[in-house]
Amino acid sequence: MQVIDIAVTKVDQLGMLLAQIADLEAQAEAIKAELKQTEGKIEGNLYKACVTLSQRNVVDNKAVFAEANIPAELIAKHTKTTAVITLKVTAR
């Protein structure tokens, strides 16, 4: 058996950590889905959870603007732009 000696870079470290986090998040989501089957308080030995049902209303701004015939210039005038830096790590 041949041992491959490679240097682990910061990008590699980040990629491995993100892969571990993704696995943990998938496990957490599966447990959340199971717990959400019951409404109310759920007691553990170390933690407790509370599942509540609610409704959320969301306004489709684009549809409202279009129906109200609001000019694109007015929308642009009141639109806030924020700089965003994105880092994406993928396996090789």
Image (cartoon, rainbow, N blue to C red):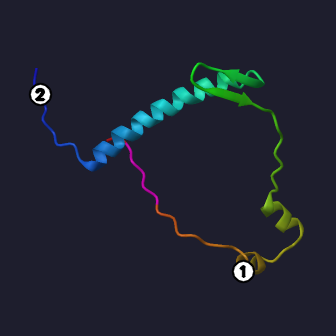
Quick check: is 87 in the magenta stretch? yes
Q: Residue at x 58, y 70 (%)?
A: 82
- Residue 43 falls left or right of residue 7: right
Q: Residue furthest right?
A: 68
Determine whether, in the image, residue 18 is placed left or right of residue 38. Answer: left
Task: Where is residue 17? Give x, y as percent.
Answer: 37, 39
Distance from disc 2 to disc 1, alpha carbons, whole Å, reads 61 Å
Q: Earlier in the sequence, mark 2 or mark 1?
A: 2
**Residue 59's spot in the image, x, y percent?**
82, 56
Name the residue at 81% across, 77% down.
Answer: 71
- Read off the magenta span: 86-90
Which residue, given by chain and number where applicable, does mark 2 sit on?
3
Q: Which residue is mark 1?
A: 77
Looking at the rendered structure, the kind of residue marked 1 is Lys
Quadrant the N terminus occupies:
top left
x and y percentages locating residue 46 in the rendered image: 57, 23
Q: Residue at x 35, y 42 (%)?
A: 15
Q: Main secondary structure of the magenta part?
A: loop
Q: Helix, strand, or loop for circle 1? A: helix
Above or below — where is 43 with respect to 85? above
Going by the picture, which residue comes out furthest to the left? 2
The quarter of the displayed image where residue 44 is located: top right
Circle 2 crowding by C-alpha within 10 Å: few under 14, some 14–19, many from 20: few
Say which quadrant the C terminus sits in: top left
Is disc 1 surrounded by few (<14), some (14 to 19) or many (20+) residues within 10 Å?
Answer: few
